[in-house]
Amino acid sequence: MHGMIRLLAALLALIATPALAAADPADGLQPKFTATSKFVPARTVQVWLPPDYARSKRRYPVIYLHDGQNVYDDPSPWSGKSWAVHRALAKLIAERKARASILVAVWSNDNRIGEYMPQAAVPPVVTPGDPKATDLFKTLPVERAKIAGDAYLRFLVTELKPLIDQQYRTLRGPRDTMLMGSSMGGLISAYALARYPTIFGAAACLSTAWPIGDGFTERWFEAHLPNGRLYFDYGTGTNDGSIAPYQSRIDAAAGNRGGRWVSRAFAGAEHSERAWAARVDIPLTFLLGGR
């Protein structure tokens, strides 16, 4: 009789005990560190590890994200909103819609436009006195001397990626090394695939800044299309409203690449962290789902 009472008491206690809460995705955030470089100024980097990393021995794909100060929980300095990419990815992993992946958020600095500019696309210096020539840099908020897209990519490829591969269990080939960015971050993501196809195999480019400088980057990309898997999107509100004609020309040049090339428009979506956060599950699924 006493045994039955003890059993019933144990069962009642179990029922009364709240279920353990699911792990907070923020638990996967590793301490920020400063990455030094021979090519660009030092900057902050923060890694996020997927929920099963600590109890697993397997290796993981990696996504490198630009404007790293905007992608986790800290409020964006520009809009007061961050992407919360780790939270979106943790949800997709739990729903088995995306492979578990390591995120590497790389902070931008005061020369953001210069570092995210596809350097090979930059037009040559205008010949003085040529009435037919137009110096596109007159319309850009950056000096020609500050263009450092190639240097930034060298930092990612030859300094940061080896460091991440050394410290974490990563899948190191291009199939599993990806990038994601918005606006100028979208430009440099696509440029990385064009310049380093043996390093990066896929990129998600949100609200890509094709219109900058009257579209000279779009014209370069039409002639130098990357071969990797590419996701592009844009909204139709605020600054995004001018992207459509440029993206349409890029899409036409790419032709039919099936699921390796995705281009989407979001009616009314703004050019903002808030808008990118609202749809970030879509590019994450493109990069990490269905394979």
Image (cartoon, rainbow, N blue to C red):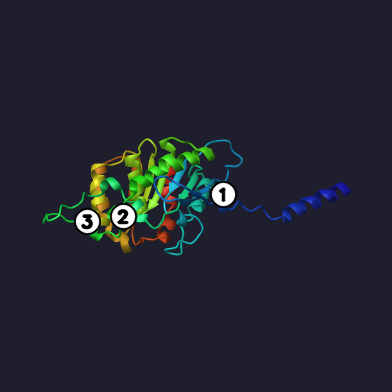
| Label whose residue precedes the other's in the sequence (2 or 3) | 3
Viewer-closest of 196 and 35 = 35
Tell me the element at label 2.
loop
Label 2 with label 3: CB-CB less than 8 Å? no
Name the residue that disc number 3 marks.
136
Residue 177 point in image, percent of width and height: 43, 40
- The answer, for residue 154, to whether it is visible in the render is yes
Residue 69 point in image, percent of width and height: 46, 56
Identify the residue at image location x=50%, y=50%. Answer: 34
Classify 154 as above or below 5.
above
User: 10 Å neighbourhood of mark 1: few (<14), some, or many (≥20)?
Assistant: many
| Label whose residue precedes the other's in the sequence (2 or 1) | 1
Identify the residue at image location x=23%, y=48%. Answer: 219
| Amino acid type of the residue tagged 3 in the rendering | Leu
User: 10 Å neighbourhood of mark 2: few (<14), some, or many (≥20)?
Assistant: many
Classify 152 as above or below 234.
above
State left or right for residue 140 relative to residue 164.
left
State left or right for residue 252 relative to residue 181.
left
Image quadrant in which you'd find residue 267 = bottom left
Question: Which disc number belongs to residue 28?
Answer: 1
Tell me the element at label 3.
helix
- Cα separation between marks 2 and 3: 15 Å
> Quarter of the image containing the C terminus?
top left
Residue 178 point in image, percent of width and height: 42, 43
- Cα separation between marks 2 and 1: 31 Å
